[in-house]
Image (cartoon, rainbow, N blue to C red):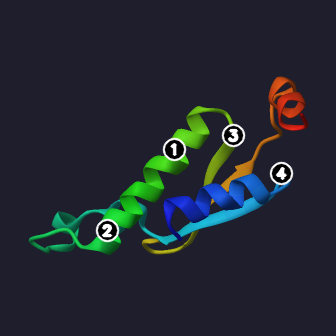
Amino acid sequence: MTDFEFLEKISNTMPDGVIEYHRGFLFNDAFASVKGKSSDSAEMKRIRELRDVAFDMHERGLVHLLQERCGDYDYRYLAVVRPLPERQQKRSTI
């Protein structure tokens, strides 16, 4: 999933809806040095951008971020969509 696809899913998901935005081990998946590679790939850059957007949406109060352990170095990274603040709900209906 790209950062834009994540934002689109947030805007189209009802409050309390859950979005899985990454599966794996986010830190390792995002950095080449952890994987023993000399240069970052486009996939790693995409994962870092997605991670940053997910955290930004959390900081803005639009999602709760959770992780669910599925196995060794295997996690589901989840965003639970929060209800919009009342002021934003009114503005979006105009």
* Residue 43 drawn at (x, y percent): 34, 73
Query: Mark 3: which amino acid?
Result: Leu
Mark 1, secondary structure of its residue: helix
Which of marks 3 and 1 precedes in the sequence? 1
User: Which residue is depicted at the point 24% across and 73% down?
Assistant: 41
- Residue that badge 4 annotates: 16
Q: State the residue lying farthest toward the left.
A: 38
Task: Evaluate if marks 2 and 4 touch, with contact meaning CB atoms under 8 Å apart.
Answer: no
Tell me if 43 is positioned left or right of 33 in this view.
right
- Residue that badge 3 annotates: 62
Tell me if 40 is positioned left or right of 23 in this view.
left
- Residue that badge 1 annotates: 55
Which of marks 1 and 2 precedes in the sequence? 2
- Residue that badge 2 annotates: 44
80 and 90: which is toward the camera: 90
The numbered disc on residue 36 is: none
Cα distance in 3D space between marks 1 and 4: 17 Å
* Residue 93 drawn at (x, y percent): 90, 37
Cα distance in 3D space between marks 1 and 3: 10 Å
Mark 3, secondary structure of its residue: loop
Cα distance in 3D space between marks 2 and 1: 17 Å
Query: Mark 4: which amino acid?
Result: Asp
Query: Mark 2: which amino acid?
Result: Met
